[in-house]
Image: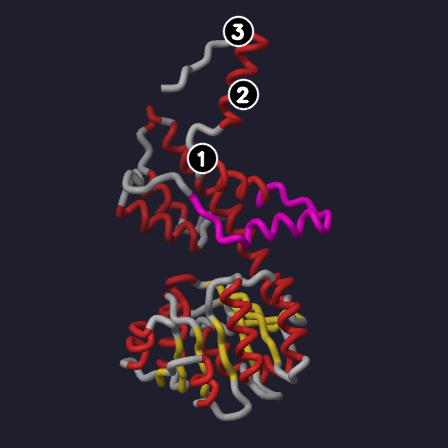
Amino acid sequence: MKLGMVGLGRMGGNMSERLLNDGHEVIVFDPDSSAVNTLAEKGASAASSLNDVVSQLEAPRTVWVMVPSGDITESTVNELVELLDEGDTLIDGGNSNYKESQRRGEHAAQSGIDFLDSGTSGGVWGLANGYCLTVGGNRNAYDRNRPIFKTLAPDDSDGNLHVGPSGSGHYVKMIHNGIEYGLMQAYAEGFELLAAKEDFNLDLGAIAENWTRGSVIRSWLLDLTVDELEKDPHLDELSSYVDDSGEGRWTVEASVELAVPAPVITAALQMRFRSRQSNPLGGKMLAAMRNGFGGHAVKKAD
């Protein structure tokens, strides 16, 4: 099957390569010409613009957009809607807000273009292991493009699923990432507690490895933790600063909108905020109040 891939960051590039390895014809475009050239050397057809991508495809066309969420997604999708024709398919595989995907789906439908929002999970390991995909949008368009989804899914499973109308694919991925926040925070707290029991001198790497063998808390995240602890047993090379991509925030916003409690995910998000603060005012305020009402000792700033 022939398709266009727009956006050749690490994930977009790996997805293009996986498609090429399975015999698909891929037209690639990215503002970074070196990324385009790298894929061209692996068999992709290079394009110099979005218009060039579309011109190299035969109807009905499929163009997959793999760019960061926000203004760049908006401008790319809008331009492609103008360039594509009725019956073509436009897929957004990035981490867009599901509400934006709903709106974009409606906009594309006005021109007879099928817009599919694909929640894409797999990270940097997707090239080797495949991606877990949750797809929203027209079911017929999903079925028509199923060879693409099947190639991107893991080899040993059909890890792609049509979940509902426009926006639902990205909504499911948003909740997926919210759950991820909670899982990661639980592991982080548990290992910090292990390390804090200094008189036991616990080997965190060995314990993590042990837990991957039949434990009820085994997971791919734990497998990755084992790898990281093997490289840096005490994680001395890392800062405790933790960023967030936005999907955790959207998950918490959805919990408020729907009045569905999500305390673990919310707390995990708040902990990421806290990780970026140095000597935060909130902590100072707590110290001041304890000193004020009880005369408790305080530590002065350096």
Task: Give the label on residue 295, or none.
Answer: 3
Residue at 53 percent of width and 42 percent of height:
268
Whether residue 251 is in magenta: the answer is: yes
Magenta-highlighted residues: 242-265
| Residue 194 sits in quarter | top left
Secondary structure of the residue carrying numbered label 2: helix
Secondary structure of the residue carrying numbered label 1: loop
**Residue 289 sits above or below residue 85 on the image:** above
Where's residue 199, x and y in %? 33, 24
Relative to 233, is 142 on the left or the right? right
Where's residue 296, x and y in %? 50, 9
In the picture of the structure, the residue carrying the numbered disc 1 is: 277
Quarter in which the C terminus is drawn: top left
Q: Residues within 10 Å of mark 3 (few under 14, many from 20)?
A: few
Relative to 197, is 237 on the left or the right? left
Q: CA distance from mark 3 to mark 1?
A: 27 Å
Q: CA distance from mark 2 to mark 1?
A: 16 Å
* Three-letter code for the amino acid on which mark 2 is drawn: Leu
Residue at 64 percent of width and 62 percent of height:
99
Say which label, 2 or 1, has the lower sequence index.
1
Q: Residues within 10 Å of mark 1 (few under 14, many from 20)?
A: few
Task: Give the label on residue 286, or none.
Answer: 2
Decide which of 35, 224 is in the foreground and name it: 35
Secondary structure of the residue carrying numbered label 3: loop
Residue at 35 percent of width and 47 percent of height:
209
Residue at 50 percent of width and 27 percent of height:
281
Seen as rendered, the residue at the extreme bottom is 58
Where's residue 89, x and y in %? 57, 82
* Three-letter code for the amino acid on which mark 3 is drawn: Gly
Badges 2 and 1: C-beta atoms under 8 Å apart?
A: no
